[in-house]
Image (tube, rainbow, N blue to C red):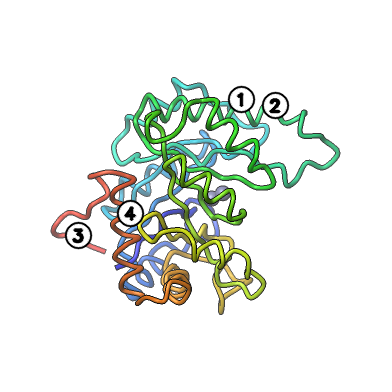
Protein backbone atom coordinates (compact mmCIF):
# COMPACT_ATOMS: atom_id res chain seq x y z
CA UNK A 1 0.00 0.00 0.00
CA UNK A 2 1.23 3.48 -0.92
CA UNK A 3 0.96 6.84 0.84
CA UNK A 4 0.77 10.18 -0.95
CA UNK A 5 2.53 12.41 1.58
CA UNK A 6 1.67 15.70 -0.16
CA UNK A 7 -1.35 16.61 -2.28
CA UNK A 8 -3.74 19.51 -2.74
CA UNK A 9 -7.14 17.84 -2.92
CA UNK A 10 -8.78 21.08 -1.81
CA UNK A 11 -7.90 22.73 -5.12
CA UNK A 12 -10.96 23.04 -7.36
CA UNK A 13 -9.62 20.84 -10.19
CA UNK A 14 -9.39 17.90 -7.74
CA UNK A 15 -12.14 18.66 -5.24
CA UNK A 16 -14.80 18.31 -7.95
CA UNK A 17 -13.56 14.82 -8.85
CA UNK A 18 -13.06 13.48 -5.35
CA UNK A 19 -15.23 10.32 -5.63
CA UNK A 20 -13.47 9.27 -8.84
CA UNK A 21 -10.07 10.06 -7.35
CA UNK A 22 -10.81 8.01 -4.25
CA UNK A 23 -11.93 5.10 -6.42
CA UNK A 24 -8.71 5.36 -8.45
CA UNK A 25 -6.66 5.46 -5.23
CA UNK A 26 -8.32 2.26 -4.00
CA UNK A 27 -7.66 0.58 -7.36
CA UNK A 28 -3.97 1.58 -7.30
CA UNK A 29 -3.56 0.61 -3.62
CA UNK A 30 -2.92 4.19 -2.44
CA UNK A 31 -4.43 3.83 1.00
CA UNK A 32 -3.57 7.19 2.59
CA UNK A 33 -2.96 10.83 1.69
CA UNK A 34 -1.88 13.99 3.48
CA UNK A 35 -3.84 17.07 2.35
CA UNK A 36 -1.70 20.18 2.43
CA UNK A 37 -2.85 23.62 3.53
CA UNK A 38 -1.50 26.70 1.69
CA UNK A 39 -3.45 29.59 3.26
CA UNK A 40 -5.32 30.16 6.51
CA UNK A 41 -8.35 31.00 4.39
CA UNK A 42 -8.17 27.52 2.86
CA UNK A 43 -7.71 25.64 6.14
CA UNK A 44 -11.36 24.78 6.77
CA UNK A 45 -11.71 23.21 3.31
CA UNK A 46 -8.53 21.16 3.73
CA UNK A 47 -9.49 20.20 7.27
CA UNK A 48 -12.94 19.06 6.12
CA UNK A 49 -11.25 16.56 3.78
CA UNK A 50 -9.36 15.10 6.73
CA UNK A 51 -12.41 15.05 8.99
CA UNK A 52 -14.59 13.49 6.32
CA UNK A 53 -12.32 10.60 5.28
CA UNK A 54 -10.56 8.26 7.68
CA UNK A 55 -7.54 7.85 5.36
CA UNK A 56 -6.90 11.58 4.87
CA UNK A 57 -5.04 13.88 7.26
CA UNK A 58 -4.07 17.53 6.86
CA UNK A 59 -1.53 20.23 7.67
CA UNK A 60 -1.84 23.88 8.74
CA UNK A 61 0.28 26.60 7.16
CA UNK A 62 0.75 29.34 4.58
CA UNK A 63 2.74 28.66 1.39
CA UNK A 64 5.62 31.08 0.71
CA UNK A 65 4.20 31.95 -2.72
CA UNK A 66 0.93 33.24 -1.29
CA UNK A 67 0.83 37.02 -1.03
CA UNK A 68 -2.05 39.23 -0.02
CA UNK A 69 -3.40 36.52 2.29
CA UNK A 70 -3.88 36.44 6.05
CA UNK A 71 -0.46 36.37 7.72
CA UNK A 72 -0.24 33.63 10.37
CA UNK A 73 1.01 34.21 13.90
CA UNK A 74 2.52 31.40 15.97
CA UNK A 75 -0.71 31.41 17.99
CA UNK A 76 -2.86 31.06 14.85
CA UNK A 77 -0.88 28.04 13.75
CA UNK A 78 -0.92 26.48 17.23
CA UNK A 79 -4.70 26.82 17.40
CA UNK A 80 -5.06 24.99 14.06
CA UNK A 81 -2.40 22.43 15.03
CA UNK A 82 -4.51 21.44 18.02
CA UNK A 83 -7.49 20.47 15.85
CA UNK A 84 -8.12 16.76 15.20
CA UNK A 85 -6.34 15.10 12.23
CA UNK A 86 -3.88 17.99 11.82
CA UNK A 87 -0.48 16.25 11.72
CA UNK A 88 1.97 18.83 10.31
CA UNK A 89 2.87 22.51 10.02
CA UNK A 90 3.20 23.80 6.45
CA UNK A 91 3.68 23.89 3.69
CA UNK A 92 6.17 26.60 4.51
CA UNK A 93 9.63 27.68 3.45
CA UNK A 94 11.13 30.00 0.88
CA UNK A 95 10.58 30.46 -2.84
CA UNK A 96 12.77 32.93 -4.73
CA UNK A 97 11.86 31.47 -8.12
CA UNK A 98 9.40 34.18 -9.09
CA UNK A 99 11.10 37.31 -7.77
CA UNK A 100 10.00 39.39 -10.77
CA UNK A 101 11.50 42.84 -10.29
CA UNK A 102 12.19 42.21 -6.60
CA UNK A 103 15.46 41.25 -4.93
CA UNK A 104 16.07 38.59 -2.31
CA UNK A 105 16.22 41.43 0.25
CA UNK A 106 12.63 42.28 -0.61
CA UNK A 107 11.55 38.79 0.49
CA UNK A 108 12.11 39.42 4.22
CA UNK A 109 8.37 38.80 4.75
CA UNK A 110 8.82 35.23 3.44
CA UNK A 111 11.69 34.59 5.80
CA UNK A 112 9.72 35.99 8.74
CA UNK A 113 6.71 33.81 7.83
CA UNK A 114 9.01 30.77 7.66
CA UNK A 115 10.38 31.52 11.16
CA UNK A 116 6.83 31.74 12.52
CA UNK A 117 6.11 28.25 11.14
CA UNK A 118 9.31 26.80 12.62
CA UNK A 119 8.39 28.20 16.05
CA UNK A 120 4.88 26.78 15.76
CA UNK A 121 6.32 23.39 14.80
CA UNK A 122 8.53 23.38 17.88
CA UNK A 123 5.70 24.34 20.23
CA UNK A 124 3.15 21.99 18.70
CA UNK A 125 5.70 19.18 18.32
CA UNK A 126 4.45 18.61 14.78
CA UNK A 127 6.78 18.09 11.82
CA UNK A 128 7.40 20.84 9.27
CA UNK A 129 6.59 20.46 5.59
CA UNK A 130 9.19 22.52 3.78
CA UNK A 131 8.88 24.00 0.33
CA UNK A 132 12.14 25.43 -1.00
CA UNK A 133 12.79 26.68 -4.50
CA UNK A 134 15.80 28.72 -5.64
CA UNK A 135 16.36 29.47 -1.95
CA UNK A 136 18.04 26.46 -0.39
CA UNK A 137 20.91 28.38 1.29
CA UNK A 138 18.52 30.69 3.13
CA UNK A 139 16.16 27.82 3.92
CA UNK A 140 18.93 25.84 5.60
CA UNK A 141 20.40 28.91 7.32
CA UNK A 142 17.06 29.88 8.85
CA UNK A 143 16.40 26.31 10.00
CA UNK A 144 19.77 26.36 11.76
CA UNK A 145 19.25 29.84 13.23
CA UNK A 146 15.91 28.72 14.62
CA UNK A 147 17.56 25.66 16.16
CA UNK A 148 15.78 23.11 13.97
CA UNK A 149 17.11 19.56 13.94
CA UNK A 150 16.43 16.36 15.77
CA UNK A 151 18.03 17.70 18.98
CA UNK A 152 16.21 21.04 18.63
CA UNK A 153 12.85 19.33 18.60
CA UNK A 154 11.97 20.33 15.02
CA UNK A 155 12.23 18.06 12.01
CA UNK A 156 10.02 17.32 9.06
CA UNK A 157 10.34 16.85 5.34
CA UNK A 158 11.76 18.72 2.38
CA UNK A 159 8.88 18.14 0.00
CA UNK A 160 9.00 17.84 -3.81
CA UNK A 161 12.77 17.73 -3.60
CA UNK A 162 14.61 19.21 -6.60
CA UNK A 163 17.78 20.44 -4.93
CA UNK A 164 21.38 19.24 -5.06
CA UNK A 165 23.12 16.39 -3.32
CA UNK A 166 24.69 18.88 -0.91
CA UNK A 167 21.30 20.29 0.11
CA UNK A 168 19.98 16.75 0.56
CA UNK A 169 22.92 15.88 2.82
CA UNK A 170 22.37 19.00 4.92
CA UNK A 171 18.63 18.34 5.20
CA UNK A 172 19.31 14.76 6.28
CA UNK A 173 21.91 16.07 8.73
CA UNK A 174 19.23 18.23 10.32
CA UNK A 175 17.09 15.12 10.76
CA UNK A 176 14.67 15.84 7.94
CA UNK A 177 13.25 13.40 5.43
CA UNK A 178 13.30 13.95 1.67
CA UNK A 179 10.14 13.57 -0.40
CA UNK A 180 10.24 12.79 -4.11
CA UNK A 181 7.48 13.74 -6.53
CA UNK A 182 6.67 12.91 -10.15
CA UNK A 183 9.65 15.06 -11.18
CA UNK A 184 11.75 11.98 -10.39
CA UNK A 185 10.21 10.30 -13.46
CA UNK A 186 10.91 13.17 -15.85
CA UNK A 187 13.35 12.35 -18.61
CA UNK A 188 15.60 15.34 -17.88
CA UNK A 189 15.75 14.73 -14.08
CA UNK A 190 19.06 12.88 -14.31
CA UNK A 191 20.68 14.83 -11.44
CA UNK A 192 17.67 14.34 -9.18
CA UNK A 193 17.80 10.58 -9.72
CA UNK A 194 21.46 10.69 -8.63
CA UNK A 195 20.41 12.51 -5.47
CA UNK A 196 17.68 9.93 -4.85
CA UNK A 197 20.22 7.13 -5.16
CA UNK A 198 22.06 8.64 -2.18
CA UNK A 199 19.13 9.30 0.15
CA UNK A 200 18.69 6.26 2.40
CA UNK A 201 15.36 4.55 1.82
CA UNK A 202 14.49 4.93 5.49
CA UNK A 203 14.52 8.74 5.00
CA UNK A 204 12.46 8.87 1.76
CA UNK A 205 8.84 9.82 1.29
CA UNK A 206 6.85 9.85 -1.94
CA UNK A 207 4.22 12.35 -3.01
CA UNK A 208 2.29 13.66 -5.99
CA UNK A 209 2.01 17.39 -5.11
CA UNK A 210 -1.16 17.01 -7.18
CA UNK A 211 -2.77 18.65 -9.10
CA UNK A 212 0.70 19.62 -10.38
CA UNK A 213 3.65 17.58 -11.68
CA UNK A 214 1.96 14.41 -12.89
CA UNK A 215 4.57 11.66 -13.24
CA UNK A 216 5.43 10.09 -16.59
CA UNK A 217 3.54 8.82 -18.60
CA UNK A 218 0.90 11.33 -17.47
CA UNK A 219 3.20 14.35 -17.56
CA UNK A 220 1.32 17.56 -18.35
CA UNK A 221 -2.06 16.18 -17.25
CA UNK A 222 -3.83 16.90 -13.99
CA UNK A 223 -2.12 14.89 -11.28
CA UNK A 224 -3.89 13.03 -8.46
CA UNK A 225 -2.85 10.74 -5.56
CA UNK A 226 -3.56 7.54 -7.52
CA UNK A 227 -0.41 8.27 -9.55
CA UNK A 228 1.96 8.03 -6.57
CA UNK A 229 2.89 4.37 -7.33
CA UNK A 230 4.60 5.69 -10.49
CA UNK A 231 6.94 7.69 -8.25
CA UNK A 232 7.49 4.59 -6.11
CA UNK A 233 8.28 2.52 -9.21
CA UNK A 234 10.89 5.04 -10.31
CA UNK A 235 12.45 5.13 -6.85
CA UNK A 236 12.52 1.32 -6.79
CA UNK A 237 14.36 1.30 -10.11
CA UNK A 238 16.90 3.81 -8.79
CA UNK A 239 17.42 1.83 -5.59
CA UNK A 240 17.48 -1.54 -7.34
CA UNK A 241 14.76 -2.91 -5.08
CA UNK A 242 11.15 -3.98 -5.50
CA UNK A 243 8.28 -1.50 -5.60
CA UNK A 244 6.88 -3.32 -2.56
CA UNK A 245 10.04 -2.48 -0.62
CA UNK A 246 9.60 1.20 -1.52
CA UNK A 247 5.91 1.10 -0.62
CA UNK A 248 6.70 -0.48 2.77
CA UNK A 249 9.59 1.84 3.60
CA UNK A 250 7.85 5.06 2.60
CA UNK A 251 4.69 4.06 4.46
CA UNK A 252 6.68 3.31 7.60
CA UNK A 253 8.57 6.60 7.23
CA UNK A 254 5.28 8.45 6.89
CA UNK A 255 4.09 6.91 10.16
CA UNK A 256 7.37 7.64 11.91
CA UNK A 257 7.31 11.29 10.85
CA UNK A 258 3.65 12.17 11.28
CA UNK A 259 3.01 10.01 14.34
CA UNK A 260 0.62 7.37 15.57
CA UNK A 261 -2.55 9.09 14.37
CA UNK A 262 -1.76 8.46 10.68
CA UNK A 263 -2.30 4.70 11.09
CA UNK A 264 -5.47 3.41 9.51
CA UNK A 265 -8.13 2.16 11.87
CA UNK A 266 -8.97 -1.49 11.55
CA UNK A 267 -12.13 -1.17 9.47
CA UNK A 268 -11.25 1.64 7.15
CA UNK A 269 -13.68 2.32 4.37
CA UNK A 270 -12.21 3.70 1.17
ZN1 LIG B 1 5.45 23.06 -2.41
ZN1 LIG C 1 2.35 21.62 -2.29
Q: Which mark lies nearer to you, 3 or 2?
A: 2
- Looking at marks 3 and 1 on the same chain, the residue that comes earlier in the sequence is marked by 1
Secondary structure, mark 3, is loop
Q: Quadrant of the N terminus?
A: bottom left
Q: Nearer the viewer, mark 4 or mark 1?
A: 4
Is the CB–ligand 1 distance for label 1 below 8 Å? no
Q: Is residue 148 above or below residue 169?
A: above
- Asked if ligand 2 lies within 8 A of label 4, the reply is no
Q: Which residue is mark 3?
A: 268
Which residue, given by chain and number where applicable, does mark 1 sit on? 112
- The vertical placement of 176 against 4, above or below, is above
Report the Cα–Cα distance between label 3 and label 2.
45 Å
As drawn, 268 above or below 35 = below
Nearer the camera: disc 3 or disc 4: 4
- Give the SS element for disc 2: helix
Q: Position of residue 24 (x, y in %)?
A: 38, 72
Q: Position of residue 166 (x, y in %)?
A: 59, 50
Label 1 with label 2: CB-CB less than 8 Å:
yes
Give the structural element (helix, strand or loop) at label 4. Answer: helix
- Of 40 and 7, the residue lying toward us: 7
Residue drawn at (36%, 75%) of the image: 243
| Disc number for residue 253 | 4
Q: CA distance from mark 4 to mark 1?
A: 29 Å
Amino acid sequence: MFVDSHCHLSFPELQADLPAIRAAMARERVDRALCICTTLEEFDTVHALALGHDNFWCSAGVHPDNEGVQEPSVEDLLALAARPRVVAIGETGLDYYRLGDRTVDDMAWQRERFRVHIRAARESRLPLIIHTRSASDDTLAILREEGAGADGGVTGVFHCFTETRSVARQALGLGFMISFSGILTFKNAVKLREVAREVPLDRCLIETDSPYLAPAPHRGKTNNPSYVPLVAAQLAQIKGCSIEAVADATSRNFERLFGPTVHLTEHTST
